[in-house]
Image (tube, rainbow, N blue to C red):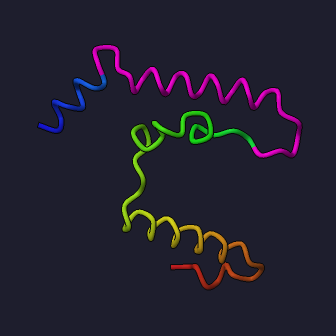
Amino acid sequence: MRNIEILISDGFIGNKALLLALSSLTTGNLNSKMKEGTQPFKMKDVLPSTHDYIVPPPTDEEAKAHAQKQLLAFMSMSPGAAPFFEV
């Protein structure tokens, strides 16, 4: 039933596709006019009410895996850390 609801809400062309196109065009246009060193606009800034629909929030497992991956990347950048990461 949920899949049918998603198909109906996405429409024939797809509201999701339209929102993705509009957000990328808008953020690209805004970011091209920004000064260097400022924080760029993201889709969440442009379309906050539809952001969770387009990009669902990560599950707890995905968030933990992403944090572990970032920590491993940070640790591997340390000078002299290469011998500890060899398999």
Asked whether 23 falls inside the magenta stretch, the response is yes
- Residue drawn 22% across and 23% down? 8
Residue at the extreme right: 36
State which quadrant residue 15 falls in. top left
Of 13 and 83, which appears nearest the observer? 13
User: Given the current orientation, which residue lies at the most extreme front position?
Assistant: 49
Residue 21 as seen in the image, left or right of residue 53: right
Q: Is residue 18 magenta?
A: yes
Image location (x, y in percent) of residue 4 = 16, 30
Q: Is residue 21 above or below residue 38?
A: above
Say which quarter of the image contains residue 35. Answer: top right
x, y percent for residue 55: 44, 43
Which of the image's four quarters has the N terminus? Answer: top left
Q: In the image as oriented, which residue stretches furthest toward the top? A: 13
The image shows residue 75 at horizontal and vertical percentages of 66, 77
Q: In percent of the image, x 67 and y 78: which residue is there? A: 82
Please state if 43 lies on the left or on the right of 37 as rendered.
left
Q: Which residues are magenta?
A: 11-39
